[in-house]
Amino acid sequence: MLYQFLPLMMSVYSVQLLSVATFFGAIFCFAAFCFKSLYAFIALFAIGELLVFATQAPVNYVCLHCVKPSMRPLSMAMSTVSIHIFGDVPSSPLVGILQDHINNWRVTALILTSVLFLASGIWVIGIFLHSVDRFNEENELQVSVTDRSNTIPLLGETTQKSLINL
């Protein structure tokens, strides 16, 4: 009976790891901007960033395991492009607009760091979503090893005929 629930529990563990790491990373990053000491800021922010970026491997795991094996390269490409389009591209102008309105870097950093708490909440919602692990599905485009009907050498007869014509 337990073996039926084990795959479901294993798929939930990676999402739980994402939510916990993001939440604690948000706490450390938020706390770092509350301190005026440079040493406290560096220590707390380094721990927070380590926890936030530790989620990249489980995200890649989820991206690879939720698609058929033939679609894995496309899945990773879409993940990378999405990260850049929704993260890198709009972040600089949005930070500038927010800083222009608030005119206080500490408050701006605290507001932007609090977005990580929202991300952690989204990962928590992901715990309750049903997922299908497609890691071991057969690839429909794979050529079987026993299918040898089209194994004519490329340099067989054509090479000999071309040498005779010379």
Image (spheres, rainbow, N blue to C red):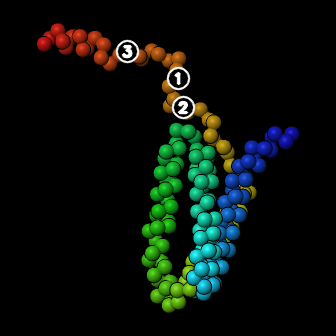
Pointers 2 and 1 in contact (CB under 8 A)? no
Residue 77 drawn at (x, y percent): 47, 51
How far separated are the C-alphas under marks 1 and 3? 16 Å
Residue 62: tell me if it is visible: yes
Quick one: 49 or 19, which is closer to the camera?
Answer: 49
Quick one: 93 or 37, which is closer to the camera?
Answer: 37
Q: Residues within 10 Å of mark 3 (few under 14, many from 20)?
A: few
Within the image, what quadrant is residue 54 found in?
A: bottom right
Quadrant of the frame with the C terminus = top left
- Element type at mark 3: loop
Quadrant of the frame with the N terminus = top right
Image point (58%, 46%), residue name: 64
Residue 107 drawn at (x, y percent): 58, 86
Image point (63%, 65%), residue name: 51
- Element type at mark 1: loop
Q: Earlier in the sequence, mark 1 or mark 3?
A: 1
Residue tagged by mark 2?
140
Q: Residues within 10 Å of mark 2 (few under 14, many from 20)?
A: few
Residue tagged by mark 3?
152
Residue tagged by mark 1?
144
- Element type at mark 2: loop
How far separated are the C-alphas under marks 3 and 2? 23 Å
Left or right: 20, with 68 as reference point:
right
